[in-house]
Image (cartoon, rainbow, N blue to C red):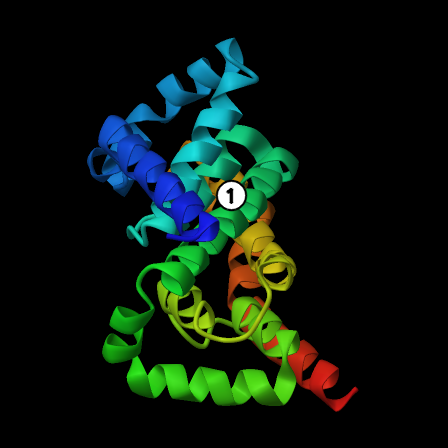
Amino acid sequence: MSAKKIAVLAALAALAALLVYLGPERYLNLGYVQSQLARLAEYRARHPVAAPLLYAALYVAVTAASIPGALLLTLAAGALFGFLLGSLIVSVSATAGATIAFLISRYLFDDWVQKKMGARLAKIREKFREEGALYLFAIRLVPAFPFFAVNLVMGLTSIRTATYAAASFLGMLAPSMVFVNAGTQLAKLDSVKGLLSPPIIASFLLLAVFPYAAKVFVKWLRRR
């Protein structure tokens, strides 16, 4: 077995152990997060270093294992850590988790991915040959495929790991910031009237407008 496969297996084992320890399925629902928001904020205040690191570890584990809940974690990051730190945690963690899933696909589960995602794999490979890393950037910025599918299928293309991580980070940065910003505003709601406050309205408008603006930007990049 090659050194790369051993390294990926070791990372996979560590990820599995982390998931067993954290038990994310118990926490990745809106009701639990809402009920525990004050307690989580208190923990963050008492542990300003450990809290972001633990949150980032959970985010990496969830995205690497393709467990539903990344959107909820993104919104909660804004509520708990604010816009700047929340955006940093989400962007770096999402990239790390995506890269782990990419490596698992490339070195361990290539045959399984090809059988399960044959048609989708062929389409992504064709577009990647035409546009290179720009295609990955575009489908991260304007998600044309599920997050987990991109991670698995891109592992079977010729893209380099560093290029994959960089394009994923840049492509996911803007949408992550949009949702983190929404999380910061939603955390401030203390009544129904709060839904009509200008920051809340602006956040929802940004969520609605962003996909269209991103498509226009991608078209401009492709023309260039």
Q: Looking at the image, how many numbered discs can be counted on the residues?
A: 1
Q: Nearer the viewer, residue 194 or 154?
A: 154
Identify the image quadrant of residue 120.
bottom left
Observer able to see residue 188: no
**Direction from residue 164 to residue 16 in the image, left or right:** left
- Determine the residue located farthest toward the top in the rendered image: 46
Is residue 201 positioned above or below 183 on the image?
below
- Determine the residue located farthest toward the left in the rendered image: 26
Identify the image quadrant of residue 111.
bottom left
Instruction: Tell me which amino acid carries mark 1.
Output: Ser
Instruction: Indicate the position of residue 100 as horizontal and vertical percent values.
Output: 44, 51
Observer able to see residue 52: yes
| Crowding near the residue tagged with mark 1, few <14, some 14–19, many ≥20 C-alpha atoms within 10 Å | many
Instruction: Indicate the position of residue 51 as horizontal and vertical percent values.
Output: 48, 21
The residue at the point 49 percent across, 29 percent down is: 80
The residue at the point 49 percent across, 49 percent down is: 94
Q: Nearer the viewer, residue 88 or 39?
A: 88
- Describe the element under mark 1 as helix, strand or loop: helix
Is residue 104 positioned above or below 158 on the image?
above
Q: Nearer the viewer, residue 78 or 103?
A: 103
Is residue 199 positioned above or below 129 on the image?
above
Residue assigned mark 1: 93
The residue at the point 38 percent across, 66 percent down is: 152
Instruction: Indicate the position of residue 24 as horizontal and vertical percent values.
Output: 26, 36
Instruction: Indicate the position of residue 96 as horizontal and vertical percent values.
Output: 51, 47
**Direction from residue 205 to residue 72 in the image, left or right:** left
Query: The C terminus appears in which quarter of the rendering?
Result: bottom right
